[in-house]
Image: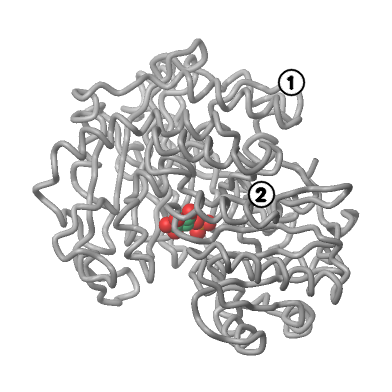
Amino acid sequence: MSLMQPNYTQTPPAVPNVMVIFGAGGDLTRRKLIPALLHLCNARLLPDSFAVLGLGRAEMDDAAFRDLMAEPVREHVGAAFDQSIWDRLVARLHYMRIDIHEGAEYERLRERLRELDSRRGTGGNYLFYTAIPPSLFAKVTGFLGAAGLLRETGNRWRRVVVEKPFGQDLDSATALNRELHRHMDERQIYRIDHYLGKETVQNIMVFRFANGFIEPLWNRHHIDHVQLTVSESVGVEHRGTYYEEAGALRDMIANHLLVLLGFIAMEPPNSFESSALHDEVDKVLDAIEPLSPEDVLRHAVRGQYGAGTLPDGERVTAYRASPGVDPQSRTETFAALKLRMDNWRWAGVPFYLRTGKRLATQHTEIAIQFKRAPKVMFKNTDVNHVDPDMLVLRIQPAEGIQMSFGAKIPGPAMRIGAVNMDFCYEDYFGNKPATGYETLIYDCMHGDATLYKHADTIEKGWRIVQSVMDVWAAMPPRDFPNYAAGSWGPKAADQLLRNDRRQWRRIPDTDGTETSTVREGLYTESRKPQS
Ligand code: BG6
């Protein structure tokens, strides 16, 4: 099992295979998949007998596909780009034009794969990756099945990685599961959520379960509430057509944010075995209290960005002006929810989730606010207020863990200031660039589905957001766009917490200017750290 591999040095390379990417010309291939393969290649985790076969609508040959990938991959990998590693990978990239709507085309695909097998020694093992619109998953799998490409014999394996969103809602997800099972066994299906592949997401479990001091505090007796923020400064880029159908709730909350929530709220699994882990996450999802239509009106907030200015001064256009987007679009690019859990550990502890495009900064974190200490012993001092402590698990960027608490401000008076204790991954483990897809792709090549989602988990996720989708669909938004690009989202999202006499944690700017005031204005006194 791949979970928590300390580093890649003792890990054997994957077994020979061809990775077939449907949607090779798309954003995901450029931004995540090929960069992830590059990182795997760098870590010597790709086998020598390996090939990528990109499939797309455009007419081009292998050489043109390699050229097409080079620039965007260089851009997404950034400073870690190494030409010699790229040279090694690029020689294994191939391309085939295909009309994926035509069954006969899959016969050609089978021939091409046979040819690659004999040229590259890939042994008939195929990993099919569906980087295509979700509405095509079932169709493509059907054609693969009909062409015999999903049939496994001897040691030869055939696996399909199904991208998210898995369906559009509960009914379509159930139907998709049924459809996939018509053509292959459950063990051949890999439902991906790349947040499960992120080191820092996996580290939530290590932090909680490998350290004795945390668990006793991890419950309703000590925790006041939890905030999950996945903020993106990017807009919808070239994905307008996809995003119009998805929106923030389907694109991010039904999957990535629920993964974070599952890891934060789960009971300790009996082991890190796949089934133990999945069972515990499923129990968390089961415990989330269903939202009635009234709850949705009070506890769910949606938003869409208008034109605005990003913190670096760049002027950007509104969502409705993006390519592929309806100029009257009602799709939400921001969503916030308050969820409650009906179980022993978390009764009465709200979980606030928010995510959005074109927010002020790119940042993913989980902030756990502890209950405040009684002020009793400071009653005759200058301390008029004792604030709660906060633990922040930073998922990206600047991955790390921060504890903020009160400390005495030096001087004759008893005053308390907010200070931080900060652990940065980079300081301890260096900066290993990763997209989150590396581990998952590698695991699939090894037949390890621990970090992939089960059908049940996906359906439970849809069940949670379904009530919100229903109410939102019945009541079209009247105030879109309701937040400016570069801001922190609609005012209603702030009000959501204010109604509970709370506020969102102030997220540091990307330029690193961070004061020690984690919750500005809440502490008696706060100061910037001395340089
Ligand atoms: C994808 C969503 O699943 O996750 C995108 O479809 C989003 O809209 C992306 O930008 C965020 O992933 P990451 O790894 O950049 O946080």
Q: Secondary structure at mark 2?
A: helix
Instruction: Name the mark on residue 270.
Output: 1
Dot 1 or dot 2, earlier in sequence: 2
| Image quadrant containing the N terminus | top right
Amino acid type, label 2: Glu
Q: How many marks?
A: 2
Whole-number angstrom distance, CA of label 1 to CA of label 2? 21 Å
Amino acid type, label 1: Asn
Left or right: residue 211 versus residue 307 is right
Image: 272 above or below 38:
above
Name which quarter of the figure residue 417 lies in: top left
Name which quarter of the figure residue 126 lies in: bottom right
Q: Measured from the top left, where is residue 391 in percent x and y?
A: 52, 37
Q: Measured from the top left, where is residue 250 in percent x and y?
A: 38, 45
Q: Can you name the residue that lies furthest to the left here?
A: 478
Q: Measured from the top left, where is residue 175 in percent x and y?
A: 46, 36
Residue 528, can we see it? no
User: Going 48% across and 20% down the picture, which residue do you hit?
Assistant: 286
Disc 2, ligand 1: is the CB inside 8 Å? no
Q: Secondary structure at mark 1?
A: loop
Image: 62 above or below 374:
below
Residue 512, can we see it? yes
Left or right: residue 139 versus residue 322 is right
Q: Which residue is mark 2?
A: 199
Front residue (pair 391, 55): 55
